[in-house]
Image (cartoon, coloured by chain):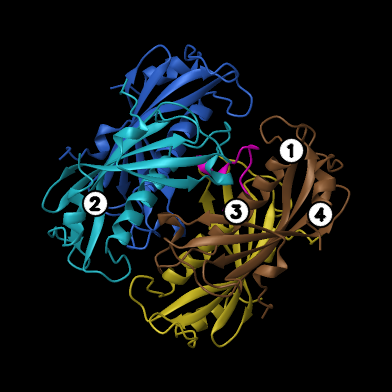
Chain colours: A yellow, B blue, C cyan, D brown
Amino acid sequence: MADRPSLADYPHIVELGTRWDDNDIYGHVNNVTYYSYFDTVANAWLIDHGLDIHGGTAIGLVVESGCHYHAGVAYPDRLRVGLRIDRLGNSAVTWGLAVFTEDDDQAAAHGHFVHVFVDRVTRRPTQIPEPLRTAMAELTG
Amino acid sequence: MADRPSLADYPHIVELGTRWDDNDIYGHVNNVTYYSYFDTVANAWLIDHGLDIHGGTAIGLVVESGCHYHAGVAYPDRLRVGLRIDRLGNSAVTWGLAVFTEDDDQAAAHGHFVHVFVDRVTRRPTQIPEPLRTAMAELTG
Amino acid sequence: MADRPSLADYPHIVELGTRWDDNDIYGHVNNVTYYSYFDTVANAWLIDHGLDIHGGTAIGLVVESGCHYHAGVAYPDRLRVGLRIDRLGNSAVTWGLAVFTEDDDQAAAHGHFVHVFVDRVTRRPTQIPEPLRTAMAELTG
Amino acid sequence: MADRPSLADYPHIVELGTRWDDNDIYGHVNNVTYYSYFDTVANAWLIDHGLDIHGGTAIGLVVESGCHYHAGVAYPDRLRVGLRIDRLGNSAVTWGLAVFTEDDDQAAAHGHFVHVFVDRVTRRPTQIPEPLRTAMAELTG
């Protein structure tokens, strides 16, 4: 069983609202949906720091992801999602993420995913563009 | 073409964050996703006013829905969703909803859906329980 | 209450599998998900008949949609979706769709949506390109 | 980089259709959606072998999941999903899954998730019920 991280382990925290259809037939947020939270929070950070998802030459493709689930959350909970960078390479970045309810600083779930930056047209790996990479360096521990 | 309502036409307004996967291949929030916003906002109001989605005897089934789309929105926009009640019957309620961006009080999209309250087990129509119905009356124009 | 159409009312029928997360907390396919079925079936037909969703100059934007729900369906049901064209204009097409279970030729739900074809870049209405429009004419009653 | 499994590595193969909203803004199936495919295929197998998702006393909760992405797929591709069991315990099962396009027997993506069977009410771990467990044993290598 993986360790359960705490809020203090993540330098960037954002609020995120759940949706009706996040709950599955068992009454809790479906395991798949956490990855949607991860995508949403990491890409919002990227866009805030200059990534142009509509027309930029570099785009981030996900090559690996994973999640450990510790406790159930459910709509209409309001959540907090923590973001950090676990590894920063030339063209790849490993995001660390965790989901917290409003009243518990121990993660309900935590996971990661790896973005490889590629050229939008050729889909070949490309260096993470500046000033994005410098901003990323501040999210590493 | 349907009229484009404004923020002032809705007595209850809530904030709602978009998600990465709300955008489709054309770069805007997919038409389907607006209905997820509608469900999320109306059911949150119901839960706030006493509906027990996990074990209550009455549940709301959707029998009709519709939406008009006026202008595109896109992740990572933050949205405002307006809620009102257009018609209130014994067992049925017609919700009116609209989606607004942060800087435009004219709706990007507006629609409706009809909830019929039924018994969770028999799925036969049942009266909208009190005090939910009294609260609903305040959301009608 | 809207009439419940039958399978024979639709000239084009395709099979569609449900997914785990189509079911909501009440154990049936969520009302929102039907619109995803509609999008999937109409766009597959468009792509089969020449629409290039990745780079074509004309794209279809949805300006209106609606659905009536007659009977519940649930994962892991296999479904049949019927497609027809209810109105065909110069730049707009109204799709009629209905969802059927495997053992009932009366629709579990039926609805429509309106596509306006626009230029991908300017987003201004454009004529439905040939040979797409000729193929569409065969889907009208 | 993880190895790329082939179709022959999976004893149970099912067909699965993509949907319009599986594609994200970059024109390929979003990384999150693969987990929806995994859930769909494993739970369909469970239901086929006796699991009652609506009222059974045992339900499967996901405690861990992960995926490696090797090649893009896109709507309207038709996919094949392979299912096997990588580890079978008293109350837990590790599913191995992979996604294949119609014309490539090397996986476009492969992953796993761990189901812990719990009592629906108490949410405490329970033995995997028979005859489900015996059927599972046949899916292990």
Task: Give the residues drawn in magenta, as a range.
Answer: A20-33
Mark 1 or mark 4: name the one nearer the start of the chain: 1
User: Pointer 3 indicates a residue of which chain?
Assistant: A
Which one is in front in this view, the residue at disc 1 or the one at disc 2? 1
Which residue is under mark 3? A32
Marks 3 & 4, CB-CB < 8 Å contact: no
Question: Which residue is located at x 32 percent, y 62 percent?
Answer: B26
Badge 4 crowding class, 10 Å Cα cut-off, few under 14, some 14 to 19, many 20 or more, is few
x and y percentages locating residue D118 in the rendered image: 80, 40
In the picture provided, is B46 more to the left or to the right than D129?
Answer: left
Residue D120 visible in image:
yes
* Tag 3 secondary structure: loop
Q: Foreground mark, 2 or 3?
A: 3
Q: Please check whether the numbered discs 2 and 3 fall on a single chain.
A: no
The residue that mark 4 highlights is: D138
Q: Which residue is mark 1?
A: D50
The residue closer to the viewer here, D97 or C141, is C141
Asked whether the beta carbons under mark 2 and mark 3 sit within 8 Å of each other, the answer is no
Distance from Cα at disc 3 to Cα at disc 4: 27 Å
Which chain is home to disc 1? D
Q: Amino acid at mark 3?
A: Val
Q: Nearer the viewer, mark 2 or mark 4?
A: 4
What is the quadrant of residue B75 in the picture? bottom left
Chain of the residue on which disc 4 is drawn: D
* Picture quadrant where residue C120 is located: bottom left
Disc on res. D108: none
Give whichever of B77, B55 is nearer the camera.
B55
- Chain holding disc 2: B
Residue A140 image offset from top left, x and y in percent: 62, 77
Q: Which residue is mark 2?
A: B71
